[in-house]
Structure formats: structure tokens, C-alpha cells
Image (cartoon, rainbow, N blue to C red):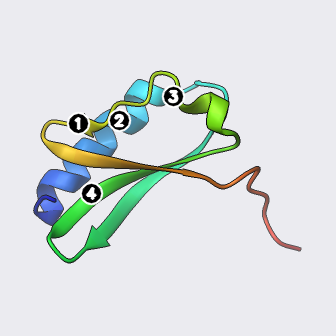
Amino acid sequence: MAELEKARAAKARLRSDLAGQPGVCGVGITHGRDGYGVRVNLRRESDRDGVPGQVDGVPVDVRVSGSIRAGG
């Protein structure tokens, strides 16, 4: 895991790299016992192609969340 500022920079880079990729619902930061990482939410497991395991030494956690919609 990484320090928060390093995770924020990795998040920004990954968000830019994945922009427009089908199936990516969101990119955020996750916190664990050893520091911070980046989380990518996907619609389906098959959307995982192109998502790296780490960015600039910051681990990337992938979650399949399905479609995300605003509540109403």
C-alpha cells in the first residue's frame, strides 16, 4: 500500500488512462491496514482487460459492482 498523496496521483493517472473504456464505473481510493490503494469499479468481470495491477507502485483493487445509478 502507499501514502495518500501517492495514491491520489495514481488515481488521477489511472482515471485518465481508463477514460472512455467501456465497463469502468468508477475510480477511487481505498484504505487498508498498510496504507492506500486505487479501486476500479467495473460492470462485469470481462471488463477487466486493460486495468493494471498497479500504477506507479500503488496497488489497484478491482471490484465488479455492476451498473451504478443515482438513487431517486
SS state under label 4? strand
Inspect the image, locate mark 2, and give the three-letter code of the amino acid beneath it.
Leu
Q: Earlier in the sequence, mark 4 or mark 3?
A: 3
Residue 30, horizontal then vertical, whole percent: 35, 65
In this rendering, the label closer to the viewer, 3 or 1: 1
First along the sequence among labels 4 and 2: 2
* Residue beneath disc 1: 55
- The answer to whether mark 4 and mark 3 are in CB contact below 8 A is no
Q: Amino acid at mark 4?
A: Gly
Which image quadrant is residue 21 in?
Answer: top right
In the drawing, does residue 28 fall left or right of residue 60? Answer: right
CA gap between label 1 and label 2 equals: 7 Å
Q: Which residue is mark 4?
A: 37
State if disc 1 and disc 3 touch (CB < 8 Å): no
Amino acid on which the number 3 mark rests in the picture: Ala
Expressed as whole percent of the image width and height from the top left, the position of residue 1 reads: 16, 59
Q: Secondary structure at mark 2?
A: helix
- Residue beneath the point at 21% across and 54% down: 7
